[in-house]
Image (cartoon, rainbow, N blue to C red):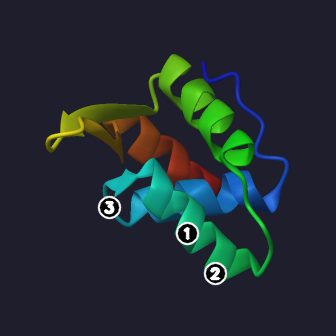
Amino acid sequence: MVDLKINNMVKFYTLCLLASGPKHGYDLIQELKKKLERRISASNVYPFLGNLRKNKLIKFDKVGKRDKKTYYLTPEGKNFTRQMF
């Protein structure tokens, strides 16, 4: 069972963006700024990504020279977002 509350638009849109495909954390923040038309800080996004990972809804791969993390939904995460929608 997933212990996760989607109680604000940042969390909702983060899941929507991840449902559309893998994203870097920085890309998530930039797209959230555009969608929500407000300032989004890393402290709004990364703790939520940690909760998603703890609940096995996302995983990440490290890519590139700087080992940037690319986050993507697991099968459980895809199922969770389908139920949420």
Q: Are marks 1 and 2 in contact (CB under 8 Å)?
A: yes
* Left or right: 78 as drawn, with respect to 17: left
Q: Which amino acid, by three-letter code, is at mark 2?
A: Lys
Element under label 3?
loop
Question: Residue 51, image x and y in percent?
Answer: 62, 26
Q: Residues within 10 Å of mark 3 (few under 14, many from 20)?
A: few
On screen, 41 above or below 80?
Answer: below
Element under label 2?
helix
* Left or right: 9 as drawn, with respect to 56: right
Q: Residue at x 72, y 53 (%)?
A: 41
Question: Residue 45, image x and y in percent?
Answer: 65, 45
Q: Which amino acid, by three-letter code, is at mark 3?
A: Gly
Q: Nearer the viewer, residue 68 or 74?
A: 68
Q: Quadrant of the C terminus?
A: bottom right
Q: Residue at x 71, y 30 (%)?
A: 4
On screen, 83 above or below 67?
Answer: below
How many numbered marks have been drawn onto this rendered protein structure?
3
Question: Residue 32, image x and y in percent?
Answer: 63, 68
Q: Nearer the viewer, mark 3 or mark 1?
A: 1
Q: Residues within 10 Å of mark 1 (few under 14, many from 20)?
A: few
Mark 3 to mark 1 CA distance (whole Å): 15 Å
- Please give the residue where the numbered disc 2 appears in the rendered image: 34
N-term-proximal mark, 3 vs 2: 3
- Please give the residue where the numbered disc 1 appears in the rendered image: 30
N-term-proximal mark, 3 vs 1: 3
Residue extending farthest right: 7
- Please give the residue where the numbered disc 3 appears in the rendered image: 21
* Left or right: 50 as drawn, with respect to 11: left
Q: Which amino acid, by three-letter code, is at mark 1?
A: Gln
Q: Nearer the viewer, residue 42 or 65?
A: 65
Q: Residue at x 45, y 23 (%)?
A: 56
